[in-house]
């Protein structure tokens, strides 16, 4: 994974795996649906795009449809600051929590992905850059430094709902499994128990996907 130095204004690429201009045409900049007013980041994106000669796709994702207009306005502003005679820009926003799905539906093999270092997702809250690098086998640029967006304080509510839902699912299925008719022995009892376990894991996966 290649990181952008947040201290030095110069942008350098790893000489071990330089991007091929014939393959890479856009920077796909991932903007989460929280605070996005950071002109320093916008300048770094402009600098990178101008150095490489790529266009820029600002791709935003928010969990609530009510946040989408504000996120779009922020992306349009960032796009206007980056766009010049040499850099073409695009803006796209979606509503949901599945960053991997959204990136896959908009990403091309010739694109380079740019995301924030503190942007984490999934049950284990792994860095999004690591996940995308693994899933897409693509170079991912990570923006580091104090100019990263800060999550709103409301994030604690999302965490509470996530783990509260897990607790309800686990306790509920534990109760169901404890009360399965024990008079049915052999393969019938084993099959019913296995089905409840599979359903439990599936619901846990669905609940986790709702929170990114």
Image (cartoon, helix red, strand yellow):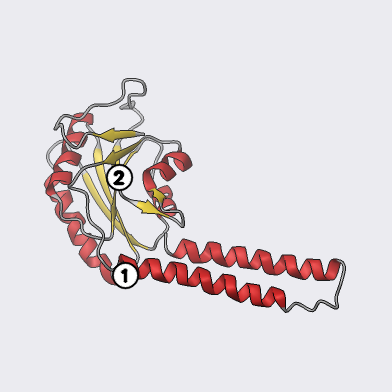
Residue at the spot 12% in from the left edge and 38% down from the top edge: 85
Please give left or right for residue 57 compared with residue 161 in the image. Answer: left
- Label 1, on which residue? 65
Residue 131 appears at what percent x and percent y? 43, 45
Residue 1 appears at what percent x and percent y? 37, 34
In the figure, residue 19 lies in which quadrant? top left
| Pointers 2 and 1 in contact (C-beta within 8 Å) | no
At mark 1, the secondary structure is helix
* Nearer-the-camera pick, 159 or 52: 159
- Quadrant the C terminus occupies: bottom left
At mark 2, the secondary structure is loop
**Relative to 32, is 161 above or below?**
below
Q: Given the current orientation, which residue lies at the most extreme right position?
A: 186
Q: Mark 2 and mark 1: span between their CA atoms?
A: 25 Å
Q: What label does residue 117 carry, if any?
A: 2
* Nearer-the-camera pick, 120 or 10: 120
Crowding near the residue tagged with mark 1, few <14, some 14–19, many ≥20 C-alpha atoms within 10 Å: few
């Amino acid at each position: 994974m290649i990181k952008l130095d947040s201290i030095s204004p110069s942008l350098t690429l790893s000489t071990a795996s330089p991007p091929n201009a014939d393959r890479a045409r856009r920077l796909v900049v991932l903007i989460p649906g929280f605070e996005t007013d950071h002109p320093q980041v916008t300048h770094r994106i402009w600098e990178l795009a101008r150095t490489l000669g790529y266009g820029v796709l600002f791709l935003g994702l928010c969990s609530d449809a009510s946040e989408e207009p504000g996120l779009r306005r922020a992306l349009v502003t960032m796009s206007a600051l980056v766009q010049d005679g040499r850099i073409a820009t695009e803006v796209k926003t979606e509503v949901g929590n599945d960053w991997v799905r959204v990136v896959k539906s908009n990403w091309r093999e010739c694109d380079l992905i740019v995301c924030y270092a503190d942007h984490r997702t999934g049950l284990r809250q792994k860095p999004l850059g690591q996940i995308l690098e693994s899933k897409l086998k693509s170079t991912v640029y990570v923006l580091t430094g104090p100019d990263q967006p800060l999550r709103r304080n409301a994030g604690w509510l999302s965490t509470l709902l996530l783990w509260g839902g897990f607790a309800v699912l686990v306790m509920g299925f534990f109760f169901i499994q404890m009360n399965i008719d024990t008079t049915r022995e052999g393969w019938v009892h084993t099959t019913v128990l296995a089905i409840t376990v599979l359903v439990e894991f599936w619901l846990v996966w669905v609940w986790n996907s709702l929170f990114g």
